[in-house]
């Protein structure tokens, strides 16, 4: 079994990346923000709590659009397309976004951009005839262990979030208490509605990048809004319906769990395909794995992410080697694997083939039964986890 990622792995030519991979660099835990009340009230609290991080998110994605040569008018039109999709899907999401903008003292369009950054930037790249592969490579690796294979008898739902290392300075853990009394935690870039997380009904959700030849052939609801809707549900059947049936602009993989039930939806914009755990384990990375999907669409995400093929395989191999019972520590080690670094399961900061930057920004382990989410920031420098609880607490655990 491999140990935590090496901190002195090969660096990309970008000097900033060399600085980020310095072996003595330490990263603070992501801040915890708790909000409650009506959608607009929640947004106000959210914006007032982390205005600098929201501004950081907006600057980063505005900068990506500027690099593509998009005029302010073109940016506004593209952002409006997806803001209108959010409004049509759930007006409460729009109200919360308006509250975030008011609380943070920024434009509504900036918050809408943060929530539609996947769709807006990829479509902008298509308009600029640069293809729809994001420079950050948008990769992730998921690992789930069913209760029958878990050393604790509880589901282990874990994930590596790979993205631009700049996200370290904009990410938060958001704790939301809805008017219904449901509470959820989500790891998300500041200003966003949701990304990965779980709720007090025991529903867990993680997602990762996919790409197909159907992407951006239609408009659709931004992924952040779909994920927020899932985390607001009390029953997994409704959560599954939202993932499978909501029209999207791009492909995406979303894994949902509740009470020991796990299902993986490989989503094209207009159709979804399912995967189930095999021998008590489910792993996924960034390519379509469903044989049905591969018989109906063309995989398009391998132009700069071929390592996706061995990342999912590598994690499964490491977990299988643990025997009939797999511990949380085993899952952590598998997601911290540095085989083939820097193109590894746990990736140190490096450049991408399309001129961007990428790193494993966070490893997270959900305990939906126990009501906690453990998160390690930039784990290629060592897995140091902070535990966030539904009760609103956060403390280091190692």
Image: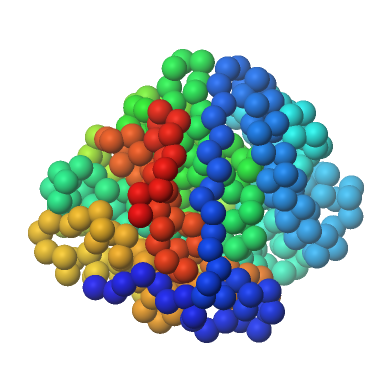
Instruction: Say if residue 265 shows up in the picture.
Output: no
| Image location (x, y in percent) of residue 105 | 80, 34
Q: Residue at x 12, y 56 (%)?
A: 325
Along the horizontal axis of the image, is 227 left or right of 168? left
Would you place residue 71 above or below residue 339 in this image? Answer: above
| Image location (x, y in percent) of residue 382 | 42, 66
Along the horizontal axis of the image, is 197 left or right of 354? left
Foreground pick, 291 / 263? 263
Numbered marks: total: 0
Along the horizontal axis of the image, is 272 left or right of 179? left
Foreground pick, 230 / 51? 51
Which image quadrant: the C terminus?
bottom left
Instruction: Say if residue 319 shows up in the picture.
Output: yes
Foreground pick, 2 / 283? 2
Q: Residue at x 40, y 48 (%)?
A: 396
Q: Colour scheme in the image?
A: rainbow
| Image location (x, y in percent) of residue 38 | 60, 17
Where residue 95 sits, quadrant-wise, is top right
Q: Residue at x 44, y 17 (%)?
A: 181
Where residue 184 sits, quadrant-wise, is top left
Which image quadrant: the N terminus?
bottom left
Would you place residue 102 above or below residue 316 in this image? Answer: above
Q: Residue at x 85, y 63 (%)?
A: 69
| Image location (x, y in percent) of residue 197 | 44, 41
Would you place residue 194 above or below residue 10 in this image? Answer: above
Along the horizontal axis of the image, is 10 left or right of 326? right
Would you place residue 4 above or below residue 157 in this image? Answer: below
């Amino acid at each position: 079994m491999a140990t935590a990622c090496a901190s002195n792995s090969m660096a990309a030519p970008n000097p900033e990346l060399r600085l980020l991979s310095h072996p003595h660099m330490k990263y603070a835990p992501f801040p915890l923000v708790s909000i409650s009340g009506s959608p607009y009230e929640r947004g106000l609290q959210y914006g007032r709590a982390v205005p600098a991080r929201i501004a950081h998110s907006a600057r980063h994605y505005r900068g990506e659009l500027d690099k593509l040569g998009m005029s302010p008018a073109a940016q506004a039109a593209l952002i409006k397309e997806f803001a209108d999709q959010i409004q049509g899907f759930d007006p409460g999401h729009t109200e919360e976004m308006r509250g975030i903008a008011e609380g943070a003292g920024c434009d509504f369009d900036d918050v809408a951009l943060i929530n539609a950054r996947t769709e807006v930037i990829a479509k902008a790249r298509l308009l600029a005839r640069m293809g729809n592969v994001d420079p950050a490579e948008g990769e992730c690796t998921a690992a789930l262990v069913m209760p029958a294979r878990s050393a604790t008898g509880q589901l282990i739902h874990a994930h590596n979030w790979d993205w631009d290392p700049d996200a370290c300075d904009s990410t938060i853990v958001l704790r939301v208490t809805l008017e219904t009394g449901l509470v959820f935690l989500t790891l998300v870039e500041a200003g966003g509605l949701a990304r990965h997380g779980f709720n007090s009904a025991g529903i867990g959700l993680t997602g990762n990048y996919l790409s197909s030849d159907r992407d951006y052939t239609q408009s659709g609801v931004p992924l952040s809004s779909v994920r927020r809707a899932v985390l607001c549900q009390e029953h997994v059947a409704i959560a599954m319906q939202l993932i499978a049936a909501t029209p999207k602009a791009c492909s995406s993989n979303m894994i949902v769990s509740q009470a020991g039930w796990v299902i993986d939806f490989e989503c094209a914009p207009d159709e979804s395909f399912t995967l189930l755990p095999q021998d008590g384990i489910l792993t996924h990375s960034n390519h379509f794995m469903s044989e049905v999907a591969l018989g109906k669409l063309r995989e398009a995400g391998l132009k700069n992410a071929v390592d996706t093929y061995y990342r999912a395989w590598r994690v499964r191999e490491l977990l299988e080697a643990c025997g009939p019972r797999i511990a949380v520590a085993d899952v952590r080690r598998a997601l911290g694997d540095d085989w083939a670094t820097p193109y590894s399961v746990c990736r140190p900061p490096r450049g991408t083939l399309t001129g961007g930057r990428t790193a494993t920004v966070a490893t997270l382990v959900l305990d939906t039964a126990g009501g906690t989410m453990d998160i390690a920031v930039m784990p290629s420098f060592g897995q140091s986890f902070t535990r966030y609880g539904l009760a609103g607490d956060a403390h280091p655990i190692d």
